[in-house]
Image: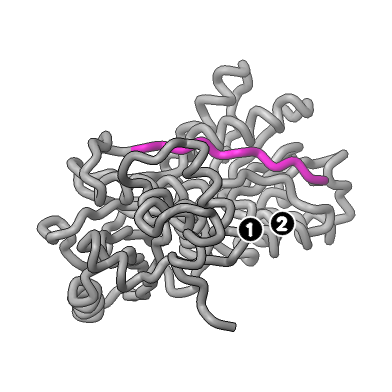
Amino acid sequence: MERVTIYDVAAAAGVSTATASKALNGTGRVSSETRAKIKQVAADLGFRPNALARSLTRKRSFTVGLLTDDTYGRFTLPVMAGISEGLIDQGVSVFLCAIENNPELAKTHVDAMLDKQIDGIIATGKRVDRSLPVDLTHLPVPVVYALTAGPDDAVTILPDDSQGTREAVGHLIRKGRRRIIHITGPSTFQVVEERAAAFFQTLQAAGLSSPQAAVLYGSWSERWGHEAVANLWSHDERPDGIFCGNDQIARGVVDGLRERNIDIPNDVSVVGFDNWEIVAEQTRPPLTTVDMNLKELGRQAGQALLRLVNGEAVETGMWRLPCTLVVRGS
């Protein structure tokens, strides 16, 4: 099939080529009714703007770069999906580069992006308390940070881990749980500290005393969740509610409890964190967990970058996006 052109759209809509161009590009004086009609005709015909022509006209590439050190894509892929969703209506494409923890590789990718005349960069990663191994502060294009540390004068978008923790622990309390334990990852992670603080605050606000070993620190793994249960069940005082730092830990906890013939959730309720669906939905019973809304985080990062590219004012500093409790069977 031949490519549909702006001339085809104009002819089908019964307008001039100039009017069709203004309507589709959001420029010039075109009535809202005419603009809507032309856009509908373009959609019906399957019209796609010529990227090269737009680039020459507006002196933009309509491409943004996405830098990440999350080589497994656990966090980056949903963030990227949100970025793409937030930018697709503007005809902007996303150029992904995985830089691992390699400063030289990171610089090479940044230089390549600049050579391609990208409009801006979104930096993302797997730890909110660590920046990527490359300096992005003096680039000729705007930069937005998502799920990774950014400078104070930049836009940095993160999940609200404290709010997500309050949702999780509050849910356990509403279910009548009074002996609640938090099994989480390494204490060196900022999110671990934030969630532990919110955990204690939520218990205190509910008038509940903290068990002697209320927070157990370990690795981000199923094995650690399994080991933590073995440790807890070696003592007489056992929890009736367990809040886990991620879904992998929670799955190990559930397996450890099931091996001891403990009814979940009647005897012990379990809540995870991440809403990693491939883990949460396949756990038995399916895992109640906190969704960090990474897709929405990516969408807002993309839209913030687009506003910066367009020269609009954007509030700098840290944006905290709310998490959502996803209730399943555990």
At x 69%, y 62%, the residue is 279
- Residue 300: say if magenta: no
Q: Position of residue 210 (x, y in %)?
A: 58, 29
Callout 1: SS: loop
| Badge number at residue 170 | none
Q: Position of residue 241 (x, y in %)?
A: 72, 38
| Badge number at residue 280 | 2
Residues shaded magenta: 319-329
Q: Nearer the viewer, residue 315 or 72?
A: 315
Q: Answer with left or right where residue 222 lies relative to residue 92.
A: right
Colour mapping: one colour
Circles 1, 2 touching at the beta carbon (< 8 Å): yes
Q: Residues within 10 Å of mark 1 (few under 14, many from 20)?
A: some
Q: Answer with left or right where residue 239 lies relative to residue 191.
A: right
At x 20%, y 67%, the residue is 134
Q: Nearer the viewer, residue 152 or 189?
A: 152
At x 25%, y 61%, the residue is 119
Q: Residues within 10 Å of mark 2 (few under 14, many from 20)?
A: many
Residue of label 1:
276
Q: Answer with left or right where residue 288 lies relative to residue 249.
A: right
Q: Amino acid at mark 2?
A: Ala
Q: Position of residue 216 (x, y in %)?
A: 55, 48
Callout 2: SS: helix
Q: CA distance from mark 1 to mark 2?
A: 6 Å
The extreme left residue here reads 138
